[in-house]
């Protein structure tokens, strides 16, 4: 009897349950329902540290294809604190190894983003059999062209921009839609293009507020009474980006605005006199059902992860490279961020459509 532990870690996203389902169904298909026992670890690495888990049954994986969130629960357990004992002097890494052994696991399956993959690699280096899958709406995981959750979040953010478009035109306003994505601009770039934004601001291309204002004024002069900006939550001005790391961090912390979009809105309104509003869809972008693309991608990823387990190819993350699902060694991808290349084809296409990046 094979014993497989599975956990979801970090911020949730669409496609977690469809991925869990694919791993489980594929394992049951291969080993038979009596040939494999799946242990659901509760709330991510926290469950592995503190021994919280449940033994799953095949029926637990039915009816979850379209379900948002994660049936296992999740939590953020920062990688940088993994080697730091907790308030009760629990050594987290030692405890995870102990619980893995106690549960008599043949493999631990981990669904997560950047921090999660770093811990997965750490556990793999510590001798555990680990297979991981790339989850995040941010699409910032090195080694894979796409993460599951990304496309569903693009759809939601695009829908927000679509809805804002109609009200922006009615009122002749400038609207900023602030898009998630943490330190990268993939989500903003894709939703911005899909939603027909006039200006897209992403962290990888620091903006000059004068250039943003110039674009809006030019639109007004050409008879367009509204402008739509898709602004990444991590967007940064040229001025800030040029600062040394410490000074920049302090300047951001001192900002009196709830987020960068509100500062940009104030600057636009002051310079153009045009009413400028901010919409922040926030966690809405991570909620609800995975779209059809993510259902297919997460199914392909889940089946590939099961194949890695069956073939004992541990220490790997499944990934999408040139539309093929492949395995990439955890040690090669852990800790690396996949940012938007400034001059990539998608950015160039946007520029050739007259979209401004405010640079
Ligand atoms: O990593 C996914 C993400 O939604 C980011 O886009 C965002 O910056 C962050 O998580 C928000 O984290 P939390 O849910 O902990 O507020």
Image: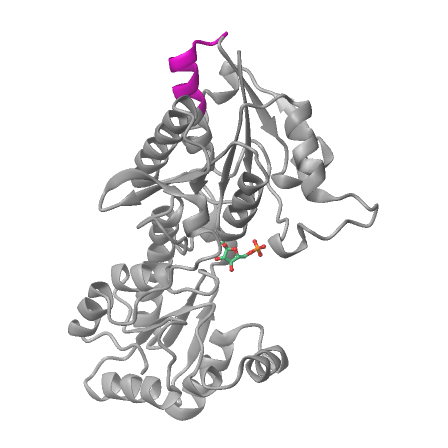
Q: Nearer the viewer, residue 101 or 178?
A: 101
Q: Nearer the viewer, residue 265 or 111?
A: 111
Which x, y percent locates residue 118? 53, 50
Decide whether the magenta segment is chiefly helix, strand or loop: helix
Which x, y percent locates residue 130? 50, 34
Q: Is residue 164 left or right of residue 254?
A: left
Magenta region includes residue 130: no
Q: How many labels were placed on the picture?
A: 0
Q: Is residue 211 left or right of residue 119?
A: left
Which x, y percent locates residue 296? 30, 34
- Look at the image and tell me whether residue 192 can be seen: yes
Most extreme residue toward the right is 88
Q: Nearer the viewer, residue 275 or 91?
A: 91
Which x, y percent locates residue 321? 27, 46
Residue at 58% x, 78% y: name it: 249
Residue at 24% x, 87% y: name it: 218
- Corner quadrant of residue 299: top left
Q: Nearer the viewer, residue 217 or 72?
A: 72
Q: Is residue 100 left or right of residue 348?
A: right
Q: Is residue 194 left or right of residue 330?
A: left
> Which segment did they paint magenta?
24-34
């Amino acid at each position: 009897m094979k014993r497989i532990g599975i956990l979801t870690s970090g911020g949730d996203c669409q496609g977690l349950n469809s991925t869990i389902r694919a791993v489980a169904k594929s394992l049951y298909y291969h080993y038979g329902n009596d040939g494999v026992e799946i242990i659901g670890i509760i709330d991510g690495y926290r469950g592995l540290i503190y021994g919280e888990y449940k033994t799953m049954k095949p029926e637990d994986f039915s009816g979850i294809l379209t379900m948002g969130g994660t049936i296992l629960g999740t939590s953020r357990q920062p990688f940088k604190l993994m080697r730091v004992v907790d308030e009760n002097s629990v050594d987290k890494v030692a405890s995870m190894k102990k619980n893995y052994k106690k549960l008599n696991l043949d493999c631990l399956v981990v669904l997560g983003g950047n921090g999660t993959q770093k811990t997965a690699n750490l556990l793999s280096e510590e001798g555990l059999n680990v297979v991981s899958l790339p989850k995040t709406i941010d699409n910032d995981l090195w080694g894979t062209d796409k993460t599951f959750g990304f496309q569903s979040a693009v759809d939601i953010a695009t829908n927000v921009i679509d809805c804002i478009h109609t009200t922006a035109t009615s009122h002749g306003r400038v609207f900023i839609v602030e898009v998630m994505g943490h330190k990268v601009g993939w989500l903003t770039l894709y939703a911005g293009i899909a939603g027909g934004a006039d200006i897209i601001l992403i962290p990888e291309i620091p903006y000059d507020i004068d250039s943003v204002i110039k674009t809006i004024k030019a639109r007004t002069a050409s008879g367009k009474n509204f402008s739509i900006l898709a602004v990444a939550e991590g967007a940064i001005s040229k001025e800030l980006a040029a600062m040394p790391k410490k000074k920049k961090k302090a300047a951001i912390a001192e900002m009196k605005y709830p987020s960068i979009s509100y500062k940009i809105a104030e600057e636009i309104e002051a310079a153009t006199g045009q009413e400028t509003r901010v919409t922040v869809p926030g966690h809405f972008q991570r909620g609800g059902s995975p779209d059809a693309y993510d259902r297919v991608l997460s199914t392909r990823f889940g089946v590939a992860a099961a194949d890695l387990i069956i073939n004992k190819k541990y220490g790997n993350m499944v990934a999408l490279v040139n539309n093929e699902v492949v395995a990439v060694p955890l040690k090669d991808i852990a800790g690396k961020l996949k940012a938007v290349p400034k001059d990539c084809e998608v950015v160039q296409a946007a520029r050739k459509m007259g979209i401004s990046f405010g640079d």
